[in-house]
Image (cartoon, rainbow, N blue to C red):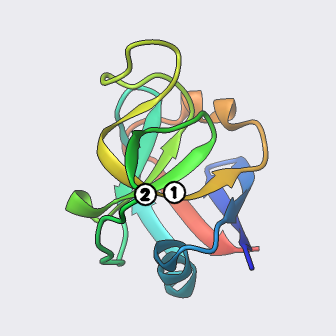
Amino acid sequence: MSHQIHIRVGEVQLRAELNDSDTAKSIHNALPIAAAANRWGEEIYFEIPVDEPLTAEASENVHVGELGYWPPGKAFCIFFGPTPASTGDAPRAASPVNRIGRVLDDVRVLADVPHGAEVRLERA
């Protein structure tokens, strides 16, 4: 069963859904989480208190609105457009990420989030 979460950054609130993967379940169990946003092109990522290995399904190729977990940095990633690793309009992670879910609302509102802004992940 998937779990709904809220992603809050300042006045912005997005609804998201975590999938049924072990990584997503570990993240859901660790909620709530607050951290400072890092920007990498049109990706926001931040370290979370979850330590999960890279899965066999992990990939650098992700979609706009997709959520990922990057094991090398223990980071939660929100993809909303091209990153420095992209070759076109689609986001591309720096290295493989575990796919953990997707944002249900318009993720493009994150384009205005500055580096260092507080991001909160909460159970819905």
Q: Earlier in the sequence, mark 1 or mark 2?
A: 2
Residue 39 lies in quadrant:
top left
Is 23 on the left or on the right of 25, as rendered?
left
Residue 87 lies in quadrant:
top left
Element on which disc 2 rests:
loop
* Label 2 Cα neighbours within 10 Å, binned few <14 / some 14-19 / many ≥20: few
Q: Which is more toward the observer, 118 or 17?
A: 17
Q: Is residue 114 above or below residue 29?
A: above
Mark 1 vs 2: CB contact within 8 A: no
**Which quarter shows the C terminus?**
bottom right
Residue at the bottom extreme, as displayed: 29
Residue occupied by mark 2: 57
Residue at the front extreme, as displayed: 56
Q: Amino acid at mark 1?
A: Val
The disc at residue 2 is none
Residue 94 percent coordinates (x, y):
28, 38
Q: Is residue 14 above or below residue 22?
A: above
Residue at the top extreme, as displayed: 88
Q: Which is more toward the observer, 83 or 120?
A: 83
Residue at mark 1 to residue at mark 2: CA–CA distance: 27 Å
Residue 24 percent coordinates (x, y):
53, 72
Identified at 48% across, 82% down, the residue is 26
Identified at 41% across, 63% down, the residue is 35
Residue 14 percent coordinates (x, y):
73, 51
**Which quarter shows the N terminus?**
bottom right
Residue 95 lies in quadrant:
top left
Identified at 37% across, 52% down, the residue is 97
Identified at 35% across, 78% down, the residue is 49
The disc at residue 119 is 1
Element on which disc 1 rests:
strand
